[in-house]
Image (cartoon, grey):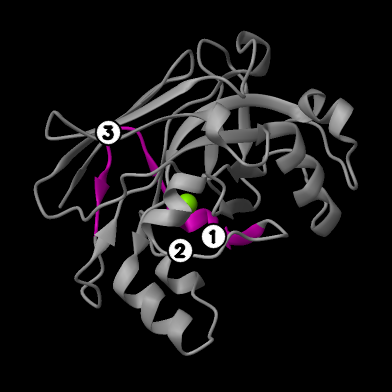
Amino acid sequence: MHQVKIKNSKQEFNVGKIVCLGRNYLDHIRELNNAVPDRAVIFCKPATSLLANGGVIEIPPYSNDCHHELELALLIGTTGKNIDKNTALSHLAGYGVALDLTLRDLQNELKNKGLPWEIAKGFDTSCPLSDFVPANDINDPNNINLQLLINGETRQQGNTNQMMRSVEEIIAEVSTFYTLEVGDIILTGTPAGVSKIVSGDKLEGTIEQVGSLQVSVA
Ligand code: MG
């Protein structure tokens, strides 16, 4: 069983599903030459993809192009289905810093064949994740800065106000497809600046008010 914690508390959650949004920042859609979706692009990562703060990323041998995607993570604290946008934030227990690591070469190969590309997103260690801060600590989750440094150099910089769907809209839309249960996690998409990581890289993701996540590549 994989667990996550709320900082400075004894609260622990058993992780259920990890639901991820793709193509939620326009500048990232453009850098990958993807189409702007009408419906949210949604996929899941298994709980076995989780990697704790300070951990080591293991890029699988079948890929030569692993990309970083820095994302705001949401932790569900109250179960719901068909959640109303106006009450969506009350379903959150906390916010965290996550990376949605992606084997871009494998993803493109599968995409071009019209096949599901979840194996490019769900490998072991593909979801580094920090501890969570209590949801009440964040005034406006739709206006916070994100930054990813690799070996001390800025690679991704953005603000959640650039998201095409707000945190409330994401929770509402995801919950029309899947019941959201206590311990489920949602990754909200990445801003522009994705690029390849290689052996020995040190990654530091920071999200304003939420905290930071430090991992390295084996
Ligand atoms: Mg992503």
Is 102 colored magenta in this rendering?
no
- Between discs 1 and 2, the one toward the N terminus: 1
Which residue does the image show at 38% across and 76% down from the upper left? 108
Task: Give the x, y percent position of residue 31.
Answer: 37, 55
Quadrant of the rendered structure where residue 146 is? top left
Asked whether disc 1 touches disc 3, contact meaning CB atoms under 8 Å apart, the reply is no
Asked whether the viewer can see residue 76, the reply is: no
Which residue does the image show at 85% across and 54% down from the upper left? 176
In this view, the residue farthest toward the bottom is 113
Q: Secondary structure at mark 3?
A: loop
Q: Nearer the viewer, residue 93 or 206?
A: 206
Task: Give the x, y percent position of residue 78.
Answer: 81, 32
Mark carried by residue 185? none
Task: Give the x, y percent position of residue 5.
Answer: 54, 26
- Between discs 3 and 2, the one toward the N terminus: 3
Mark carried by residue 122? 2
- Between discs 1 and 3, the one toward the N terminus: 1
Asked whether the viewer can see residue 171, the reply is: yes
Magenta range is 41-58
Q: Residues within 10 Å of mark 3 (few under 14, many from 20)?
A: some
The amino acid sitting under disc 3 is: Gly
CA separation in Å, label 3 and label 2: 19 Å
From the image, tell me which residue sits under label 3. 54
The amino acid sitting under disc 1 is: Pro
Task: Give the x, y percent position of residue 155.
Answer: 24, 38
Q: Is residue 5 left or right of residue 179?
A: left
Q: Residues within 10 Å of mark 1 (few under 14, many from 20)?
A: some
The amino acid sitting under disc 2 is: Gly
Asked whether disc 1 touches disc 2, contact meaning CB atoms under 8 Å apart, the reply is yes
